[in-house]
Image (cartoon, rainbow, N blue to C red):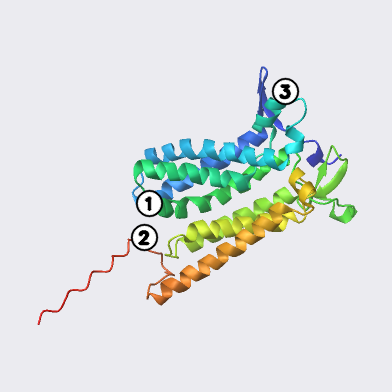
Amino acid sequence: MHWTGTLNPTAFEFGSLRVQWYGIFITLGMLMSLGISIRRMRKLGVKTEEMMVLFLIAIPMAIVFARIGSVVANYKEYFVTPYDWNAFVKTIAIWNGGLTILWGVPGGALGGLIWAKIYKKDFIACADIILPTALWAQGLGRWGNFMNQELYGQLVTNPSLQFFPYAVFIADEMAWFQATFFYELVADWMGFFLLTYLCRRVHLRGFGVLSYTAVYTFIRGVLESVRSETSSVDQQLGFNAVQVLCLVVAGLCLLAIVLLWVRARKKGKKVFYREGAPVGYPREPADEPATPEVE
């Protein structure tokens, strides 16, 4: 058996407590994203303590939403009859895997909106800086899927292609499958560096939010076409709902960026700064009422 099929999802144990690699990678991704965000948010005058509060509000909400999304997509697996205590524990058992990022991001954004209201911060300006860092965390979190031997692609029968990182050996299936988790990891990190470059040079309100959404949903939409798992919702609809939704959202976000860019240029604003964009988004002054002429 290839080494990719002998992975142990449990990192270590303390008595009856098992610490899973999935949780370790997810946590590391969140902490790294937090560290990057703390450094970048200093230019908006946001303190480290305030960022820690944001972390404590947004991350739990993101996890709850992400779990709800996974359960909804695979409701046949969780909502069984009779729905007893064991079924309930299985429903909330995030330590066994099963978090849907597409639901987690809106949950985290809602937490961020609550934080912005509490601390009286510009939510869009903060989100433009923080959201692109999520690509780094999401990429790192895919190593947790690797350890759990999940989120793999189509069967690979050609012996010349049965090697990592193109393919991964799944022990439960005793066969090779495309390592889509690794494809997404690479794509997420490439997207992170691309947006890091662009967001430092583009001065357009909402660009960080829209570009992150466009990049991630495009990546997810493309990779959904090669994944082997079929959710309960997809079985009911007869098509990959996530793929369709992702590609539609990515297209709409790109269209919104273009329209905002054109609108700003028509107003005579400079959008791209080769040496680095100015900090923040100053509010546009309201039109002053016309002064009546005195004859």
Could you say whether the residue bearing mark 2 is in a helix, strand or loop? loop
Asked whether disc 2 touches disc 1, contact meaning CB atoms under 8 Å apart, the reply is: yes
Q: What residue did someone put label 3 on?
A: 86
Q: How crowded is mark 3: few (under 14 residues within 10 Å), some or many (20 or more)?
A: few
The residue at 63%/34% (across/down) is 23
Nearer to us in this view, 7 or 92: 92
Name which residue lies at 74% across and 46% down: 233
Checking the image for residue 281, the label placed there is 2
Q: How far apart are marks 3 and 1 (CA)?
A: 44 Å
Q: Name the residue under label 1.
A: 122
Disc number lying in front (2 or 3)? 3
Mark 3 and mark 1 residues within 8 Å of each other at the beta carbon: no
Q: Which mark is first along the chain, 1 or 2?
A: 1
Three-letter code, disc 2? Tyr
Residue 171: percent from the left, percent from the top? 84, 38
Q: Do the residues labelled 2 and 3 touch (CB within 8 Å)?
A: no
Amino acid type of the residue that numbered disc 1 sits on in the rendered structure: Asp
> Residue 227: where, in percent of width, then height?
77, 51
Q: Nearer the viewer, mark 3 or mark 1?
A: 3
The N terminus is located in which quarter? top right
Q: Is residue 224 above or below residue 23?
A: below
Across and down, in percent, residue 118 comes to 37, 40
Can residue 235 be seen by looking at this rendering? Answer: yes
Percent across and percent down for residue 10 are: 70, 29
The residue positioned 48% from the left and 61% from the top of the image is: 207
The disc placed on residue 181 is none
Q: Which comes sooner in the sequence, label 2 or label 3?
A: 3
Q: How many labels does the image show?
A: 3
| Residue name at image x 34 percent, y 45 percent | 120
Amino acid tagged 3 = Asn
